[in-house]
Image: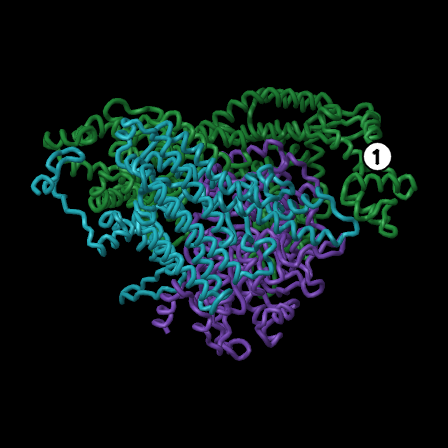
Chain colours: A cyan, B green, C purple
Amino acid sequence: MRKPLVLRHPSILVFLAVLAVFTLAVTMLSAGYGTGAISTSMVKTLGKTLCLALAAVAMDLVWGYVGILSLGQMAFFALGGYMIGMWLMVARTEGIVTGSLANLPIPPTEAEISQAVATQIFGVVGSDQFPAIWALSGSLIGQLALVVLVPGLLALVFGWLAFRSRVNGVYLSILTQAMTLALALYLFQNDSGLRGNNGLSGLQNIPGLESVGQERLSVWFLWASALALGLGYLMIAWVASGKFGSVARAIRDDEARVRFLGYSVEGYKLVIFVLAAVITGIAGALYYPQAGIINPAELAPIASIYLAVWVAIGGRGRLYGAAIGAVFVSLVSSWFTGGRAPDLNLGFYTVKWVDWWQVLLGLSFVLVTLFAPKGIAGLVDLLEGLRPPKRGGAPLGPDMGALQEREATE
Amino acid sequence: MRFIFIALALMALALPAAAQAPDLGAVIAQHRGQIEKPSRQSIGPVVQAIAATGPQGAALLQAWGDRALGLRKSDGLLVIVDGDRLTDAATGADLPPAEVTLLRPNSGVRGVISDALAGAALSDPDPARRAQALDALSRRADASQLVLLRAALDDPDPGLAARKARLERLLTIQHDPDPAARIAAIEGFGGDTGLDFRAALNPILATRRVALETVPPGANVAAELSPGDDISRDAAYAMLVEAGLAPARLTPQAERAMLAQHIQGGMVGGVPLAQLGHDAARDRAWTALESQGLVQPAASEDEVTAALDRFHFLDVYAEPDQTVTDAARAALRGTETRIGLMQAADLSLDALSLASIYFLAAIGLAITFGVMGVINMAHGEFIMMGAYTGYVTQQFIADRTLSLIVALPLAFIVTFAAGVALERLVIRHLYKRPLETLLATFGVSIALQQLAKNIFGTQARPLTAPAWLDGAWTLNDIVGVSYIRIAIFVLALVFLGLYLFIMNRTRLGLEVRAVTQNPGMAASMGISPDRINMLTFGLGSGIAGIAGVAIGLFAKVTSELGSDYIVQSFMTVVVGGVGNIWGTLAGAALIGFLQKGIEWLNPANTLAAQTYMILFIIIFIQFRPRGIIAARGRAAVGA
Amino acid sequence: MNTFTSACAGLAILAGCAGAAWAQDDTIKIGVLHSLSGTMAISETTLKDTVLMMVDQQNAKGGVLGKKIEAVVVDPASDWPLFAEKARELISVNGVDAIFGCWTSVSRKSVLPVIEELNGLLFYPVQYEGEESSKNVIYTGAAPNQQAIPAVDYMMEELGVEKWALLGTDYVYPRTTNNILDAYLKGKGVATGDIFVNYTPFGHSDWSKIVADVVALGADGKKVGVVSTVNGDANIGFYKELAAAGVSADDIPVMAFSVGEEELAGLDTANLVGHLAAWNYFESADTPENKAFIDGWHRFTGDDKRVTNDPMEATMIGFNAWVAAVEKAGSTDTDKVLDAIVGVEVPNLTGGTAKVLPNHHLTKPVLIGEIREDGQFDIVSQTPEVPGDAWTDFLPESAKLDSDWPGKQCGMWNTETNACVQVKSNY
């Protein structure tokens, strides 16, 4: 009889407990349900950060556990957002249109309503027809299914093609980057059917919940995001542990050997890639109603690279590391770019953080890669007194993986 | 025949002048408001009136067109400004210096003025003036100017004489009253592909679409259209409706509006309002109203068919003479194939140019990534650094040719140093962790980009090519390519040669190849892999710097210059096949030609071309994961 | 103050900063919502400085309602969702009475729901595509009928253009503007075949094919004109390619809607002389007001070379209109200011006045300028003030719409059915 998952990995319990306490604390300080010490915009920021953390945890699964540095994860994130955004737009506009058409002497036909809705939504791109991809947009269930299906399917097709032809390493990274770039460029076109550069907007107004008010709605979304993060974390931790996880890590460390042992490397990779894409899509579907607007800029390659940066800074190969990285870097980042960080007066030059934050971020990123490959999560090891034995030193042979000096002597 | 024309025209011009030769001052006073605030539409008569006053009028017009006409601030006197010299526009008398507000006629008005002056300027002793006059005439001319041109065909300058002759032929096509002369002129051009020739023919072939019950005799019909085939039935019927020849068909909006007018006690035509949310119920209500005679019956499908059968739908030439239109059509058709070929050639040149730009951006990467296997995401920023080096050099050295000569090696030195620093400080420690090289260099990339913003600002900076790179090499009106693109092409070729030379013919190249293939063995042969790696990386980065100068010259210098090219550059190398310069060349060619090809298929949307190009590359890599020219043998294992 | 702010900002990460922390009752606060970093920083930073200059000047005159004005500057970093977040923060946390901000349409659409929900007040200073009228926004930039339509009229009448190339960057402003122009030109009898439309990505640099396509349009023997809604850096490559291809303004004039004094600073203008731009303001306007404004700007920035441009004038007009409305209403309450602001007239810099209309747009003169060698414009045409039209008359769907805030309390009034389509915007 094996011990349950959470007991084998106490970090899971700690993570969930911290998440629960955090959610509770924010709720009690929020404007909607508590003292109001935390403004609604801050609650939204925190809720969004939880979604980003979920995306980062999924990124950690593909990168930290299977070794696929996917630089296209935000494509799945944004697709999830687009899918839920379609329903939000249509349902909200339908409410407005039926309201205004009801004043007419002759009641409108279904076709007229749909025509008016389409005119409202696509007027900005000079069209008055629903494109074919909006076929399910009237149904919440349909679009929710698409939140899972569309990113999953894209990952399946892309992953199947790429893994099958054994594209890996940096090639795969560049290819995933090309994928998100292509998708972003496609969506930038007005004819893509998703309103081009305008994207979908006003997503924070949830149809049917107009009376709730943003103060409380933002807390609801925080709860949903926390729940999704908790469940997603559990699921990914479960996948990453056990035999499946062991094979995954083995693929990361030496793909060829695993293949020779008879495992279907492509199958393992594909399952994990698709799973991560689906979870990322869900995170996106929760993120964009809090952000309020989604447009193709969200898919730009840089966004996905930032996701990788967060995971790397947080500590790759451990799920809580990825979550910490996402929360820490995105919040610090928004603090520095928000103009609230005090200027640093060096006497001869005043450092304005709005201008210099990116430089600092870039350099700290280099430093983390060079000197602290374990990231922030490495601090946990320090606390626990875990230190890898120093077996470095000059290599004794010229090739990769040669015995190193101290390894030989100790 | 022609002689009589010239004589008549000259008389027509001379007569008014001789008859009264109106005083320029009076003309100015009369049209004062128009001169100060001219409009192309109405200025024609004023310009004619001024031109008719004689040489001083012409001088005034000349000054006006050159924006040298102004109002003296003290009293509003119209004056001509020539440097420091002021003259009274009406009399030509010298005036003491004074403050002047210059008049700003817009380019439409200036066009009218230069038209008016063109006739006389055709025989001006100054060749530049004659060329200007020809420019003006080739933009717009009418029959009277054809007469003037014929009178001034002789020109001492052979180039101008040829232009005059050609223009005379073109104007003959458009304005000669004699059809035979026009046809002769058209046929005289043979299969000429010049834009001006087609511009002369196409107006002759302009058609308008009409719907007629009977075709009038003598109408020069281009084509008869049958509804449903050449023109959609809806469009054809819409033409009839618009001309008032047939009743409109019932649209849902009209139906709805009419129904709304006939609501009686919550019912329309006996159908309750609540049911009118369905089309079938609306039709029932409409039929009921129709039977009560409350609404006009709308055109039914049968009536539409009948109306369409009754009318002829024609494209009619505006030009009445059929022989002329036939000749013009034949001439145009004769040019079609050649124009198609020329367009293909032009497109190929564009594609070649784009390919050379991609190649130039990617060649440094072919060294650092292709040969060494190092992913350098900051490569784009090295390109940017090169471009900014060019900009800064231009700030210090005013002479553009000289500054370019200085900037190219300087850009190499700057980015070589940056590359070496990056290799020593960062990449050296990560040779065994390629994915982390990617991330670390990405960190360097965002830091460098922001640094550039902090130093140079976010605004694009000018990097101007020397004058000898201005303009374009043009074979004819269709095929042409700008000199700057040719220069980039040449630069790309030079670098290809340089790369091949260094790699295959120098000690450094030998050592680089040795280190790449087997660092351990190379080290034991006395080659220092560290040093070689450093130099190779520096070389790749340095070439990126030079590419930056070239790209900055043809596009723009901004901090985002590098990131615009980085993904494409990587794809060029990957598509071509890593570790082989010919592969990079093939990759650049493939991408360049592909992108132009897709742009040609869909000229309205350049964004789509880029999207499909990337999509194609993704799919291409699935089937040839090692690129067009795949590395074979041992080298392939490491990649 | 500084340490307090930083401590507060430190707390903000976990706890958010309570509104009370900023409360200083002796000032009137306005928000400045312009990107100071990211791609839009280049354009928007200038507007932030303009607002700060206006605040300085107003405070030197004694502020408004006897109180000093305090500007709260935030940086939405060219990130559209961040615009919504920062707007919410400005209104609900900082308690600002008006916001001056946004440049791109996307950012405006991102802010709209927040502004309408919290009943804020936004002054939007950039020329835009129209088709919008919100209760809570004053549009101080040009609507299409104040820029695009007069510019096309000018090309048709003064330059005799018969064949049109509408080139734009692929986003909402060029798309909508070109749709309107397309409908307008066809209404004027231009055939479908005589309108060539092309969209390019942001920052496009490979213009050779497009320029060749435009030149080839001349094969019909009709005068070709280009209407360019190409945005930002992409213009540089475009004009360079035009110059290289030897296209002079006399052959093919280019009328640009997004190229102003700032953009020309990045270019060698020698080859662009004679090409055109349409705005409601040029720095070269010869009026005493403009001279004073430019002097003030040079003083404020400490840089004699900083150019001024159209959105700066729009920002200035918006600020002055707000001050006038607040003085008139005797309050900074949004509803009272909105009631008072309609009908307010403030001088513009080209010698007339800008009046706030019931549809929350302004009256503006339309100026056409020809590019000079020194990067400035020769004003070759100036109309009297044109009232801004929120819903264009040239698209069938919006021709029947009207907007009248004080009268009908509606920004989207259907004049056919005489009913309000919607009170709040549908973004």
Name which residue lies at 85% across and 45% down.
Answer: B271
Residue nearer the viewer, A389 or B423: A389
Residue A4: % across, % down: 34, 46
Q: Secondary structure at mark 1?
A: loop
- For the C terminus of chain B, which image quadrant? top left
Task: Give the vertical position of A378 relative to C138 (above or below).
Answer: above
Residue nearer the viewer, B522 or B343: B522
Chain ID, mark 1: B
Name which residue lies at 37% across and 40% down.
Answer: A70
Task: Give the vertical position of C336 relative to C228 (above or below).
Answer: below
Residue B593: % across, % down: 44, 28
- For the N terminus of chain B, which image quadrant? top right
Q: On the image, numbered disc 1 is attached to which residue?
A: B299
Amino acid type for the residue under numbered disc 1 = Ala
Please identify the residue farthest to the left as the structure is shown. Answer: A409
Residue B272: % across, % down: 83, 47
